[in-house]
Amino acid sequence: MPKIITQKVFADSDDPAIWINYKNPAASLILGTDKDNFNGGIYVFDLKGQIDSIRSKVGLKRMNNVDVIQNVPWRNGTIDLAVATERGENQIRIYELPSMRPLDDGGIPVFIGEKERAPMGVALYKRKSDGTLFVIVGRKNGPSGSYLWQYKLDPNKRGKIEATVVRKFGKYSGFKEIESIAVDTLYQHVYYSDEQIGIRKYHADPKKGDQELALFGKTNFKEDNEGISFYHLTDSTGYILVSDQGANQFQVFTLEGSSANPHDHKHIGTIPVTAQESDGSDCTAFPLPGFEKRLFVAMSTDKTFHFYSWEDFIKKGIGNFRSR
């Protein structure tokens, strides 16, 4: 069971992201989207699941997925950011954290010139070598080979953000859609769910090419493979957690691959959840008040987000991952 079930959003909960206040962990925040067509938003919750009405952004059009990145080199210092797709306006929204001050001049259009735009998935990536910031955006439909677009994000002279397309990549089966996108900060790879097909893996750094590195999770799911999140056990090992949406559970894969093949992500467990038909998730290995044993967050279709203690979460699992 979750330790916390949040207050309900207005209409249609979709995807969470965790922001950690390292100086004052009790002030950490959970963001969650509501993809209502006209009164959608990004809701901000405290660790008790209460909505922060001052920071939350509502009245937006079909907010889909959200991601958070911290400690990004920015002008003369660093910045923490939240980026979300506003599907109803064919754009992404960018906010500074923890204030939720907008930095996008009302939104940054994506997939300009394309017949199919409708942005859905989003993931932020900071290159380790130089701190360059990117956002990878997916859409409701599009051509295989350039389904995802990657943008470089930079501050302009007015302190707002500009986005420049640097890459178009990503295979697509054409069976359903691609919504969940996630970047693993440990190995710097991007993963995305080609629903009903599996999880695809690429280098997050555009300098490293567009070759698909893996397609896994092809047989483990009842219906759609959906939300992706990562849990780091050590500086070289961890888990990839993927929502098995139709079965109300998460499938668990090794993050590090095998000695023979670093892109061989073995299925090692299944964890049932009370969250209903979960689209999205996030987790952290940083201890937080009330979640000293770490935190896992899953979206539920009843307009809420469920906060689980990681220790309680994995105790429900079936498989051998707990012995690692």
Image: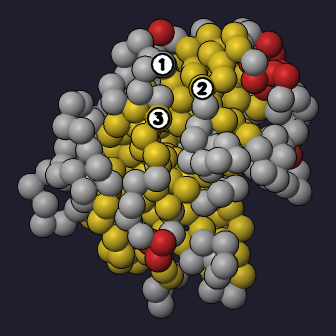
Is the Cβ of the residue at disc 3 closer than 8 Å to that at disc 2? Answer: yes
Hey, what amino acid is under mark 3? Phe
- Residue occupying the point 65% across, 57% down: 187
Image coordinates of residue 76 in percent, x first then y, are 69, 88
Residue at 47% across, 90% down? 157
Image quadrant occupied by the C terminus: top right
Mark 2–mark 1 contact, CB under 8 Å?
yes
59 and 30: which one is in front?
A: 30
Inter-mark Cα distance, 3 to 1: 9 Å
Amino acid type at image mark 2: His
- Where residue 222 sits: x, y (%)? 41, 12
Asked if 145 appears above or below 64 in the picture, the reply is below
The CA distance from mark 3 to mark 2 is: 9 Å
Structural distance between the alpha carbons of marks 2 and 1: 8 Å
Residue at position x 81%, y 40% in the image: 233
Question: Which residue lies under the disc numbered 3?
Answer: 216
Q: Earlier in the sequence, mark 3 or mark 2?
A: 3
The dot on residue 267 is: 2
